[in-house]
Amino acid sequence: MPIGGVYTINPSQATQTAQKLNPRVIIPMHFKTPRCGFPVAKVEEYTKGKSSVKARKGSELEMKKEALPKATEIIVLEPAL
């Protein structure tokens, strides 16, 4: 889910979109990182106050259909270098 707000939807719009789509997994992207010079939102602006937020080490994730969570989870990956 793009959350940065510049050239994409912002954190508030991303929250509204997620509520409409009701996905089982949300992986935020297009957010502020130490290497990003664009004036985009930080991932915390999207995840603040939300439950089921999990930070994962690494920039890749493999999931299997049978292992998907029942309720929506937000998984924050580390930005790739």
Image (tube, grey):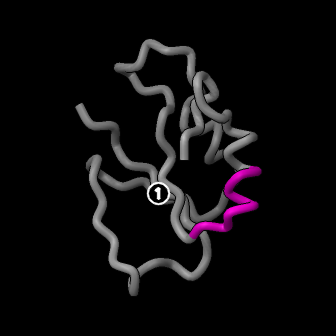
Q: Is residue 60 left or right of residue 5?
A: left
Q: Quadrant of residue 41?
A: top right
Residue at point 49% right, 15% down? 38
Q: What is the magenta segment's predominant secondary structure?
A: helix
**In this picture, residue 45 sits left or right of residue 28:** right
User: Residue 35 vs residue 58: left or right?
Assistant: right
Does the segment drawn in magenta span residue 45?
no
Q: Say what amino acid the circle numbered 1 marks.
A: Ile
- Give 7 or 34, whichever is nearer the viewer: 7
Badge 1 density bin: few <14, some 14–19, many ≥20, Cα 10 Å: some
Whether residue 50 sits left or right of residue 56 in the image: it is: right
Residue at the farthest left position:
81
Residue name at image x 43 percent, y 54 percent:
55
Q: Please tell me how many numbered marks the rendered image carries.
A: 1
Q: Residue 74 placed where, x, y %? A: 54, 58
Q: Which residues are magenta?
A: 16-23
> Which residue is rendered at x = 60% and y = 22% of the image?
6
Q: Residue at x 55, y 40 (%)?
A: 2
Q: Which residue is mark 1?
A: 75
Quarter of the image where the C terminus is located: top left
Frontmost residue, 33 versus 6: 6
- Secondary structure at numbered mark 1: strand
Q: Is residue 25 above or below residue 34?
A: below
The image position of residue 44, as x and y in percent, is 59, 39
Q: Residue 68 location, x and y as percent?
A: 45, 78
